[in-house]
Image (tube, grey):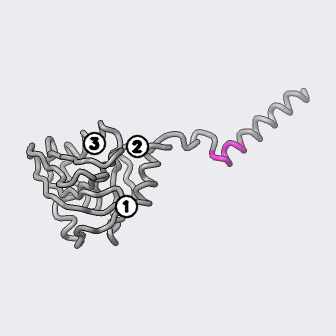
Amino acid sequence: MIFIKRLASFIEISAAVAVLCGCAEQSGHTAADFDTLFPMRLANKEFRAQIAVENSEKARGLMFRKDLPENDGMLFVYDSPQKVSFWMMNTPINLDIGFFTQDGTLTQIKRMYANNLDSVPSSRNDIAYCLEMNAGWFERNAILPPAKLDTALLQKAINARKKK
């Protein structure tokens, strides 16, 4: 009987400790979903973005979206700086894309037209991040190169997606 009472107490205490430590179910080992929107900042403009880190996510991008909230977008993250290229297959909305170097510097902005299969390449080969937003978003917010992306916020979002 004493053993059972001690075992019950041990189980209750263990459960309480697990909850307090965040060890039960929410252990922090699961990555945030692709659909998660993260707070971001470019220059002084706050916005929200999905973070595409996996190749399959980058390939899917904003395909099949019929609309996009004004201050929402998608940030594409590359493991190493490179020349990148985009197209608008199955994307029925016009978008602008910003190309960024590893330190978060915006190098150029290009318009991409709905369902257009023409390649939209970066002019540089040192691109680490790309940001897709509604067409005209950069202009409406007076964001031009060399505006800076808040890389601390971006890194926090990348870590949440990858759960390193």
The quarter of the picture where the N terminus appears is top right
Q: Main secondary structure of the magenta part?
A: helix
Q: Foreground mark, 3 or 2?
A: 3
Mark 3 residue element: helix
What's the amino acid at mark 1?
Answer: Met
Q: CA distance from mark 3 to mark 2?
A: 14 Å
**The residue stretch that appears in magenta:** 16-22
**Label 3 Cα crowd, 10 Å radius (few <14 / some 14-19 / many 20+):** some
Residue drawn at point x = 24 percent, y = 62 percent: 107
Image spot of residue 146 (x, y percent): 27, 68
Going from N to C along the chain, the mark reached first, 3 or 2, is: 2
Image spot of residue 2 (x, y percent): 91, 29
Q: CA distance from mark 1 to mark 2?
A: 17 Å
Q: CA distance from mark 1 to mark 3?
A: 18 Å
The quarter of the picture where residue 60 lies is top left
What's the amino acid at mark 3?
Answer: Lys
Residue 40: which numbered mark, if any? 1
Q: Nearer the viewer, residue 110 or 19?
A: 110
Residue 33: which numbered mark, if any? 2
- The residue tagged 3 is 58
Count of picture labels? 3
